Image (tube, rainbow, N blue to C red):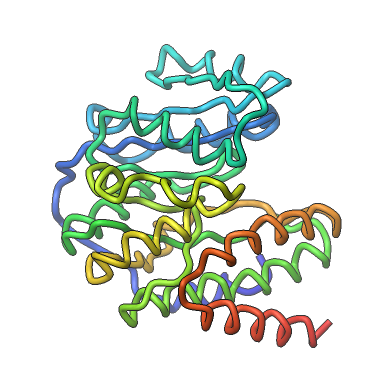
Amino acid sequence: MLYLRKGWSKLPYFTSQSQPSKKVSILVAARNEEENIGRTIECILQQDYPQDLLELIVVDDHSTDRTAEIVRSYAGQGVKLLQLRVGDKLNSYKKYAITKAIDAASGEIIVTTDADCRMGPKWVKTVMQYFEEHDSYLVSSPVIYSEEKSFFEELQTLEFLYLIGLGAAGIGNGNPTTCNGANLAYRRDVFFEMGGFKGIDNLASGDDELFLHKVAEKYAHKIGFCKSRDAVVFTDAKPDLASFISQRKRWASKSTKYKDKKVVALGVAIWLFNFSFV
């Protein structure tokens, strides 16, 4: 990791002596992730959180590889598998996958992450401590690129820093703007109160930021950012320019739904500033 090993070491840890009391359902939507899903499941199964209060649901989103087979091999450890069979009728399979998983979930708190993520054993416990001490309705936590294999991936790590900072600053100022679905937690009842993804389900992206905006319209004061190293989720940068551009096009598609266009302008300005260094 190019930039955050020193920077994050200076951040205050979130610490608490409170004991977990809420059941958590961790949801992972996966499509053709046979190379990654096993490692992600192992990280989640190793969480320092009461097993009777932890549920893992993986939704296989029309995979054509061994993703479902790998997930099924963890059934004996309580991992639940849902498989989508809805054809080519939806604009956002991920939102549909998350909705189906939430319908099947039994946890009071929903935590979403991605099938190519890694996290430390205190991840869930740290996020939930923040949840309970602040009586939060939605909590965003850091996502960091790691294990970079090239200079291009290191540049992405730097570029991704502004997204983390922008999201944390907005939440801290009472004006939530951005977050990342690879490390997002919210109350299940609030999801249903907001109507789930209704109104934003026509976009391929937006299961994170656009849902954040829905919650912020009514409960901005109940949204928090868990600034702790133990709450970090690690993922991978894109290996080449084509996949990077494809990702950013998907992310940009949700900006058309932003009610506050100043957020779009700020994001473009910071991106151009970062690009100028190249």
Kindly identify the residue that appears in the image at 41 percent across and 55 percent down.
Answer: 211
| Identity of the residue drawn at 59% across and 66% down | 256
Q: Position of residue 61 (x, y in %)?
A: 60, 28
Is the residue 101 above or below the residue 236 in the image? above
Q: Quadrant of residue 218?
A: bottom left
Q: How many marks?
A: 0
Q: Which residue is rendered at x = 52% and y = 83% of the image? A: 262
Q: Percent from the top left, x then y, of residue 105?
A: 32, 29
Vertically, is 199 above or below 174?
above
Quadrant showing the N terminus: bottom right
Image quadrant where one finds the C terminus: bottom right
Q: Is 56 placed left or right of 28 in the picture?
A: left
Depth check, front residue: 181 or 142:
181
Residue 244: image location, x then y, percent: 77, 58
Front-most of 275 and 4?
A: 275
Image-quadrant location for residue 14: bottom left
